[in-house]
Amino acid sequence: MGTNNQYNSAKLWQIGFFALNNTATNLYMFALGFVSYYATGIGGLSVVVISTILTAMRVFDGITDPIIGFVIDKTETKFGKFRPSMILGNVIMAISILVMYSFTHQIPKSFQFIFFVAVYAVYVIGYTFQSAVTKAAQTVLTNNPKQRPLFSVFDSAYTIAIFTGGQMFVASYLVAKHGGFTMSLFTELNTYALILSGICTVLAVIGIKDKDRKEYFGLADGTEETKFRDYWPILKNNRPLQMLIIAASTDKLAGQLVRQPAIVVLFFGVILGNYALSGTIGLITIIPSLLITFYGINKARKIGLKRAFVMGTWAVLILFAFLLVFFLIIDPTKISLQNIGITTSVFLVVYSLAMAFQSLTSGIVIPMIADVSDYETFTTGRFVPGMIGTVFSFIDKLISSLAPAIVGFCLAIIGFKDSLPQMDEKLTPILLLLTLGLKFGAPILGFIASLIAMKFYVLDDNKMEEIQTAIAAIKTQAGVEKTQEPVTVISEETRKEMPAL
């Protein structure tokens, strides 16, 4: 895999600390996953209205991505390129969440809609500032192909802790403590999110500190001579970026659908008859998820990120298809941890593996974005990780933003227009089919789209070795490391002189 002196390697603790930047934003994402219950149950907004708002805000989130990515690439301060955005984003999110939950339900009803949208929009801007850095700064953290997958180990472990441990905490503790989704529940949940997210941000800043310097900024000196209109040529000409967007966004939509609070309530609370089981099952899946993640990342270090992603996608596709058929032919009320039989055992094993492989594939995507950014540097000479990461996020969020709208409108069609399903809903055939279709059927279509896209994604392990060797050779040739003179384009003549390309 080449010699190590061509690579910018990181210490293990730096990778682990910086992965907490994604954890910081995921904490807010998890806490706001329940905002529809606040907005409808306490704020007084209807199901269709809040579903539309959440979808529109997701689209707005995507629109802000290219703007903020452009700003990040242009940023040059004594505190580096990435750290200012991390801190600013976290502060904005903290303030907006406090304002949203403190005042929305107290202001006159005629102003609630406008107020909620405005505050949510401010939150989105803060979220984009911090989350954009997670993707963009991968390029300076490390370009060693044996190290890049390690980010996914830490990120997947942290993500599992938030979304499985957090669901158990809410379902088994907070709901019981506060008697449902009450104002006191949201206050306690948001307090934990704000504090933990702040701590994670501080540690992430420490992790990236020594890498947030000019000598790691591609072939140039850190500030690219780019214009906002350069987004289109990047998207148009970077085929790996196009294919990764298709693969990741369809997977992201699948993950968003599975985690929608209303779907969790319907699946565990109505179909299985025990909402608290969602937290317990989440706890059970932690160990398999970690083991599968460690296995998958170890494979990725040997066979490359692309092949590991395809392997994980095939696995989760097969497992989801099995679960869809399984729930159409069994009596779901027989699934119980108090009386574990063959039905419960099969469900626990297959569901745990499905969630584990889905976690693996989602974790692999972030370092793959860094590969795409290096490909852009290789082909054009431009170091624009902010633009690459945010053009990815822009389309990714546009597609995944459909999740709350899909769920909200599907529920409205079958009668849930003014309130979301509760744990005591009667299970009807249409409710069963709708829940299974959204939880397993729709994600299956997303996994199929991912596999098709990966057929045209060229950045396997061999190609990435060529790219990193070429970039290292060009930097040495041009004297960038010593003179800091910008090299904006890799000429065809220069590329022909390089070995093995």
Image (cartoon, rainbow, N blue to C red):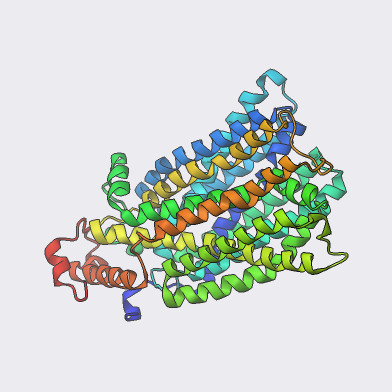
Asked where in the image residue 91 lies, by quadrant, the reply is top right
Looking at the rendered structure, the number of numbered marks drawn on it comes to 0
**Is residue 1 shown left or right of residue 12?**
left
- The residue sitting at the front extreme is 329
Residue farthest to the left, as pictured? 493
Residue 305 vertical position relative to residue 205 in the rendered view, above or below = below
Q: Say whether residue 207 is left or right of residue 489.
A: right
Q: Is residue 135 left or right of residue 277?
A: left
Locate residue 280, reporting x and y percent.
Answer: 78, 61
Q: Position of residue 290 (x, y in %)?
A: 63, 70
Q: Residue at x 76, y 39 (%)?
A: 421
> Residue 159 location, x and y as percent?
62, 60
Q: Indicate the quadrant containing the C terminus: top left, top right, bottom left or bottom right.
A: bottom left
Q: Who is closer to the viewer here, 321 or 355? A: 321
For the N terminus, give its image quadrant.
bottom left
Residue 213 at least partly seen:
no
